[in-house]
């Protein structure tokens, strides 16, 4: 009843990269990212993060570097108040004074736009989107160099999703934090990542830029994936309007191109 | 750690043991337990062990898998063995330091170990070869006479099947929560026993909340399908005795008689 979840993967992720990992259900995305902070350890081969082998004994150090947000915020919220819950990781991993902790907690909350009045509420009274923001803040609070998010937008409304990506963008820009996102939504990944890993049957099938990844739609579809909807639209338009670019993956880029056509018919 | 619990885990298969009626399997395993507890004869107990191993073999469940259920009770077995070996009265066999090992003590230890092994193997074989649904169905049918004295048999069976159904779900969830909290820096392995117990709070709280939420959802789902207990309910799969059951119970009864023979002879 056992099977190999991921195999034959060789990859290097640089500081400050925004990596999107996409793949069909069961393609090994979550398994792959859980190797990054030593929750899972490779049976063969090795994973090295900032010079630390995940099989070494410096696992605590490793978990300070790699922050990981799981799919369900309900799995990690447990304290009486949002404030205490965000503080949990900080208390466990570092020895700060009360004031230092407070500064960091407030900063993490601000980054996830959690208001002060929310901070004193019980995490179980919150809405789905709020819970997720608290969960992410609870990981951000330790200021990880690498932030891994597994399906971070599941259950978020479009606005919540946009806000989340803006916050992540901001963290990446100001702190040069490496951000790795696992997702099955092409739109999300296309808009955010500057590098895309396509997982298929437990191994990396593609490791490239969004432009290149969404070029071969047939290949993506054979792996149970698809390109963003606007890419399909661009293709359809290019059949009618000559020279219309087909490498469009975000709504913003589509708008730009369409405006060009409208202005110069 | 958590994955070792085989109780309530079904091992899919197509063997004679799998096909037998759950009622037959339950009664047989109960009979086996009774005999194992009543007999004091070493030969009977060994026969019982051989018999349960044969039964596992017939079910085509890997032996190692069936014995996995023993792991959690290993400590109990070791404990009783040690106690029995060193602290029984009787004819002294040899002495280590201040502890005297008696002949009776050793025999008693072997008997206890055999007894527990057979008990666990026998009962886990039932759950390994019977789907939870069939199992509770069987129990409900067997307890049916108790309805006469107003025992809520159907409700008990329903609660059991729900509990069995949710064991794997909650175990999987526990593992996910442990991972999520570990990633946040939670540490479950260091400190004394109180600190360790305390370190599980971040796991238990989300687990309980999710269990209650699931229970709530389940109740809503059942109510919206107009579920209202046992009266006049029919089943998609009726339990019926077949030839296989006749053969299985025949073989079993023969085995049980065989086990009892040494008891009468010596």
Image (cartoon, coloured by chain):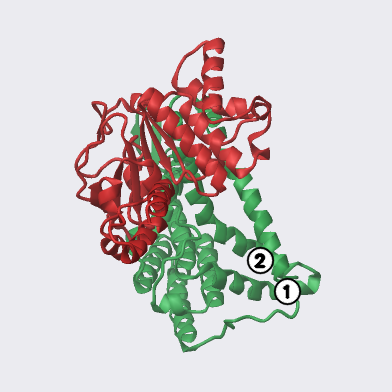
Q: Please, is residue B135 above or below residue B163 in the view?
A: below
Say above or below: A38 vs B107. Answer: above
Of the 4 image quadrants, the one containing the N terminus of chain B is top left
Quarter location, residue B155 = bottom right
Residue located at (80% from left, 69% from top): B150
Q: Quadrant of the C terminus of chain B?
A: bottom left
Q: Residue at the far bottom: name it.
A: B243
Question: Circle 1 — which element?
Answer: loop
Along the viewing direction, whichever of B29 and A142 lies nearer the viewer: A142
Report the residue marked by disc 1: B230
**Alpha-carbon neighbours of circle 1 within 10 Å: few (<14), some, or many (≥20)?**
few
Give residue A65's quadrant in the image.
Answer: top left
**Residue that label 2 marks:** B158
Badge 2 marks a residue whose secondary structure is helix
- In-front residue for pair B132/B116: B132
Q: Nearer the viewer, residue B236 or A240?
A: A240
Which is more toward the observer, A183 or B61?
Answer: A183
| Chain letter for mark 1 | B
Q: The disc numbered 2 marks a residue on which chain? A: B
Residue B221, position in %: x, y? Answer: 67, 64
Chain that the image shows in green: B
Instruction: From this view, report whether residue A61 is shown above or below residue A25.
Output: above
Labels 1 and 2 touching (C-beta < 8 A): yes
> In the rendering, at what x and y percent does residue A40 appear?
33, 41
Mark 1 and mark 2 on one chain: yes
At 68% from the left and 39% from the top, the residue drawn is A125
Q: Colour of chain A?
A: red
Alpha-carbon span between mark 1 and mark 2 = 9 Å
Left/right placement of residue A219 relative to residue B221 reads: left
């Amino acid at each position: 009843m056992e099977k190999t979840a991921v195999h034959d993967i060789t990859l290097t992720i640089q500081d400050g990269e925004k990596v999107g990992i996409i793949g069909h259900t069961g393609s090994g995305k979550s398994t792959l990212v859980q190797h990054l902070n030593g929750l899972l350890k490779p049976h063969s081969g090795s994973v090295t993060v900032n010079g630390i082998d995940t099989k070494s004994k410096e696992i605590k150090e490793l978990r300070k570097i790699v922050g990981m947000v799981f799919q369900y915020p309900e799995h990690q919220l447990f304290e009486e108040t949002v404030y205490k819950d965000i503080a949990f990781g900080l208390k466990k991993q570092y020895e700060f004074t009360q004031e230092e902790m407070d500064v960091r907690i407030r900063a993490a909350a601000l980054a996830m736009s959690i208001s002060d009045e929310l901070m004193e509420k019980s995490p179980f009274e919150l809405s789905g989107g709020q819970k997720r923001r608290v969960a992410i803040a609870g990981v951000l609070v330790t200021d990880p160099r690498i932030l891994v998010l597994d399906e971070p937008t599941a259950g978020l409304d479009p606005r919540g999703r946009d806000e989340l990506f803006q916050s992540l963008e901001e963290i990446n820009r100001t702190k040069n934090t490496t951000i790795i996102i696992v997702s099955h939504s092409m739109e999300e990944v296309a808009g955010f990542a500057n590098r895309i890993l396509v997982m298929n049957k437990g191994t990396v099938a593609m490791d490239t830029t969004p432009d290149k990844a969404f070029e071969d739609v047939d290949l993506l579809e054979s792996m149970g994936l698809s390109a963003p909807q606007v890419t399909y639209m661009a293709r359809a338009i290019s059949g009618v309007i000559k020279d219309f670019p087909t490498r469009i993956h975000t709504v913003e880029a589509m708008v730009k191109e369409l405006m060009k056509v409208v202005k110069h018919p | 750690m958590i994955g070792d619990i085989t109780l309530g885990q079904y091992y899919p298969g197509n063997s004679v043991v799998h096909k037998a009626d759950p009622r037959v399997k339950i009664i047989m395993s109960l009979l086996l337990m009774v005999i194992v507890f009543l007999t004091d004869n070493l030969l009977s107990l060994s026969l019982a062990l051989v018999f349960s191993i044969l039964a596992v073999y017939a079910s085509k469940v890997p032996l190692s898998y069936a014995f996995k259920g023993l792991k959690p009770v290993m400590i109990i077995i070791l404990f009783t063995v040690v106690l029995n070996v060193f602290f029984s009265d009787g004819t002294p066999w040899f002495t280590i330091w201040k502890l005297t090992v008696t002949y009776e003590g050793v025999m008693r230890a072997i008997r206890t170990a055999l007894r527990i092994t057979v008990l666990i193997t026998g009962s886990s074989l039932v759950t390994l070869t019977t789907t939870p649904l069939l199992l509770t169905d069987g129990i409900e049918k067997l307890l049916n006479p108790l309805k006469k004295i107003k025992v809520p048999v159907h409700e008990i069976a329903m609660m059991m099947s729900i509990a069995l159904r949710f064991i794997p779900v909650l175990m999987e969830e526990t593992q996910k929560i442990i991972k999520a909290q570990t990633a946040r820096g939670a540490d479950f392995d260091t400190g004394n026993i109180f600190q360790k117990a305390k370190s599980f709070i971040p796991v238990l709280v989300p687990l309980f909340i999710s269990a209650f939420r699931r229970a709530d959802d389940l109740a809503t789902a059942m109510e919206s399908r107009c579920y209202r207990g046992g009266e006049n309910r029919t089943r998609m799969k009726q339990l019926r005795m077949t030839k296989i059951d006749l053969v299985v119970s025949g073989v079993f009864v023969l085995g049980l008689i065989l086990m009892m023979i040494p008891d009468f002879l010596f």
